[in-house]
């Protein structure tokens, strides 16, 4: 049985997951796409006090990649599959907690495309010219390239995706895991606010708290380590706004305002994505 806690940002998901872990002898598994990154602690809201309470001072899938690494939902499914199986093998209950719905969606329901993205392959193919990509695809499947219209045949993205599909044997492993998950084997609890005003106030309070905890100092430390604003981890909400402030592009107050606005917009997107999942049992927060 998987117990899953999800929902909008700033709704207290970790606290509820902690309560469930105590009740059901569980171990926490993170599926927040921002908390998989090392060194991104304060702004992403990692609960270090909770970490010390579970799994020999860790929550699974916290701090597993550096900010300059790309970590996709496919990567998450591969990592989470191993962790969940390990927890269950030891007779414990996996308690998944996070707000990155695409991570959860792909873990439970699989990928829309038969072959998930292969970002290492894409990085390699992006260095090829259109003519080189055409030759690669022609060797793999001459019929496929012949079916492309002239525009698609000269579109590197379309060519790369076609190549990716033909080389995507990893998809079979992802599907074999997804096929083992049935609706009866997991329960999802979703947390969301009843009204926008309470959501905005909660986000404002959290941003203020993280500034007091040293959010700006954290960003300075990351930049000092050599990480750049274009790195995947630093494209996260909060980091981008503070970097703009440190670069002198906006004032501190404007950075805070933009940070809050971005968090509110993110919470709205979370609700939009999740509301169509009929398996989520919603708890509304006043």
Image (cartoon, rainbow, N blue to C red):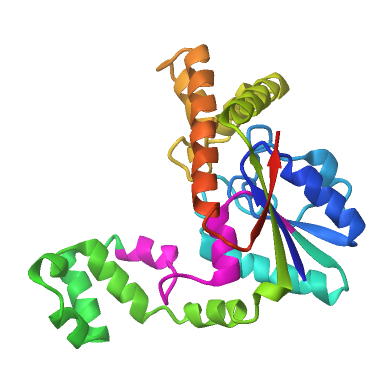
Can residue 57 be seen in the rendering of this structure?
A: no
Please tell me whether residue 44 is drawn above or below residue 68 in the rendered image.
Answer: above
Residue 92 position within the rendered picture, expressed as x and y whole percent measured from the top left: 86, 68
Residue 262 position within the rendered picture, expressed as x and y whole percent measured from the top left: 49, 31
Q: Is residue 96 left or right of residue 152?
A: right
Residue 27: quadrant of the picture = bottom right
Tell which of 197 and 232 is nearer to you.
197
Tell which of 75 and 269 is nearer to you.
269
Residue 117: quadrant of the picture = bottom left
Q: Is residue 117 magenta?
A: yes
Please tell me whether residue 52 is drawn above or below residue 182 in the rendered image.
Answer: above
Can residue 62 be seen in the rendering of this structure?
A: yes
Residue 180 position within the rendered picture, expressed as x and y whole percent measured from the top left: 65, 81
Boundaries of the magenta span:
96-125
- Residue drawn at (83%, 76%), measured in percent from left and top? 89
- Residue lying farthest to the left in this orientation: 150
Q: Is residue 239 left or right of residue 136?
A: right
Q: Is residue 223 magenta?
A: no
Q: Is residue 160 left or right of residue 225?
A: left
The quadrant the C terminus occupies is top right
Residue 19 position within the rendered picture, expressed as x and y whole percent measured from the top left: 86, 49
- Residue drawn at (54%, 20%), measured in percent from left and top? 256
Tell which of 77 and 128 is nearer to you.
77
- Residue drawn at (45%, 23%), measured in percent from left and top? 244
Numbered disc total: 0
- Residue drawn at (47%, 12%), measured in percent from left and top? 251
The quadrant the N terminus occupies is bottom right
Tell which of 252 and 185 is nearer to you.
185
């Amino acid at each position: 049985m998987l117990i899953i806690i999800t929902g909008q940002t700033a709704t207290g998901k970790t606290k509820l997951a902690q309560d469930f872990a105590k009740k059901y002898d569980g171990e926490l598994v993170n599926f927040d796409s921002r908390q998989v990154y090392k060194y991104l602690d304060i702004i992403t809201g990692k609960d270090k006090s909770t970490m010390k309470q579970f799994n020999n001072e860790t929550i699974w899938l916290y701090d597993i990649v550096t900010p300059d690494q790309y970590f996709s939902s496919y990567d998450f499914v591969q990592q989470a599959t191993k962790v969940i199986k390990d927890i269950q093998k030891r007779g414990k209950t996996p308690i998944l907690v996070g707000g990155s719905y695409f991570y959860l969606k792909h873990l439970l329901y699989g990928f829309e495309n038969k072959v998930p993205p292969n970002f290492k392959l894409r990085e390699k193919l992006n260095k090829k010219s259109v003519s080189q990509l055409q030759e690669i695809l022609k060797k793999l499947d001459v019929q496929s390239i012949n079916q492309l219209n002239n525009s698609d045949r000269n579109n590197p993205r379309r060519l790369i995706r076609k190549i990716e599909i033909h080389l995507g044997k990893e998809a079979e492993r992802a599907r074999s895991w997804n096929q083992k998950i049935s609706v009866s084997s997991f329960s999802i609890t979703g947390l969301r606010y009843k009204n926008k005003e309470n959501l905005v106030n909660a986000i404002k309070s959290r941003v203020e708290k993280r500034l007091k905890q040293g959010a700006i100092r954290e960003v300075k430390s990351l930049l000092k380590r050599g990480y750049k604003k274009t790195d995947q981890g630093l494209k996260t909400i909060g980091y981008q706004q503070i970097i703009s402030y440190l670069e002198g592009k906006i004032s501190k107050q404007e950075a805070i305002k933009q940070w809050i606005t971005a968090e509110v917009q993110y919470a709205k997107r979370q609700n939009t994505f999740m509301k169509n999942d009929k398996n989520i049992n919603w708890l509304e927060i006043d």
